[in-house]
Image (cartoon, rainbow, N blue to C red):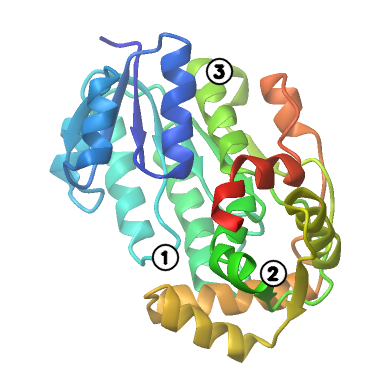
Amino acid sequence: MKNQVLVTGATGNIGGHTVQYLLKNNIPVRALVHKIDERSEALAAQGVEIIEGDLSSLESVSTALKGIKSAFFVYPIKAPGIIEATAFFAQAALENGVEHVINLSQFGAHRNVRSHGAQNHWIAERVFDRSGIPVTHLRPTLFAEWFMYQAFMIKTQSKFFLPFGEARFAPIATEDIGRVVATLLVSPTAHQGKSYDLFGPKILNMTEIAEIFTESLGRTVTYVPIDTETFVDIVKKFMDADEYFIQHVSSLGLDLKEGRTAGMNDLVETLTGQKPMEIAEFVSKNKAAFI
């Protein structure tokens, strides 16, 4: 079935939203999942073809890409290994005649970025580009879902703690990224060879975001700026993170303070016909986590 699409990361946030948008449009979906569990079984119950495998295995990826027209590649920022996984994916896509790949990269990915993870995403982009596979790179800014990591503190202390100073950026919901991915998977031709920076609908600083939480939850929520070292200690304690991810988030905090993540455009609406989600709507949709 050559009009079928492959979604990696289908049990995660972006991949999961991508799958749902594709299913709503009656697009046959195959998902490559790391393991069979209740999440993959829920997708199978919706008609998704499930392939168990690993992005670090060329054979797994090649099996998953057989008969596929377009594919979504996403690799977790928390783990090293993206360059090898990208090479395997590109090779398997070439072998199987895949017509287009949507690659989820990082906003600010470039040769001299501080974050090793973001730099590796930049190298991964170059691997896809040089492979000859038609590709579109997506570079979203910080996710609105970052605040889900702070949900317990917001719930219990009405505070959130981040090392971002008064940095301004336009957080984007993963639901909006998934909608962009699904749109490009279905109609990729005009987007071949393009790189798109993706933003939420409004540039905000942390204090302004705290005010949105306050209004949405009906109680005062306060932003508490902390230094990078304190944030690293929190990440180590509560997120079971290794040094690779810690180096990434430490670098991200510095980049934010220096304005390197600032930016704005209307590409989400241009590409999908729908405005991206406001932070107030995101908080409302996830209100149960914060109260």
Mark 2 sits on what residue?
A: 158
- Residue at 60% x, 57% y is 290
Amino acid at the residue labelled 2: Ser
Viewer-side label of 1, 3: 1
Say which of 208 and 257 sits in front: 208
Which residue matches tag 3? 189
Residue located 49% across and 67% down the image:
117
Residue 96: percent from the left, percent from the top?
Answer: 24, 25
**In the depicted structure, whether residue 187 falls above or below residue 244:** above
The residue identified by callout 1 is 78
Counting the numbered discs, the total is 3
Q: Is residue 25 above or below residue 168?
A: above
Q: Residue at x 71, y 32 (%)?
A: 268
Amino acid of disc 1:
Lys
Please state which of residues 169 and 213 is positioned toward the viewer in this rendering.
Answer: 213
Q: Which amino acid, mark 3?
A: Thr
Q: Earlier in the sequence, mark 2 or mark 3?
A: 2
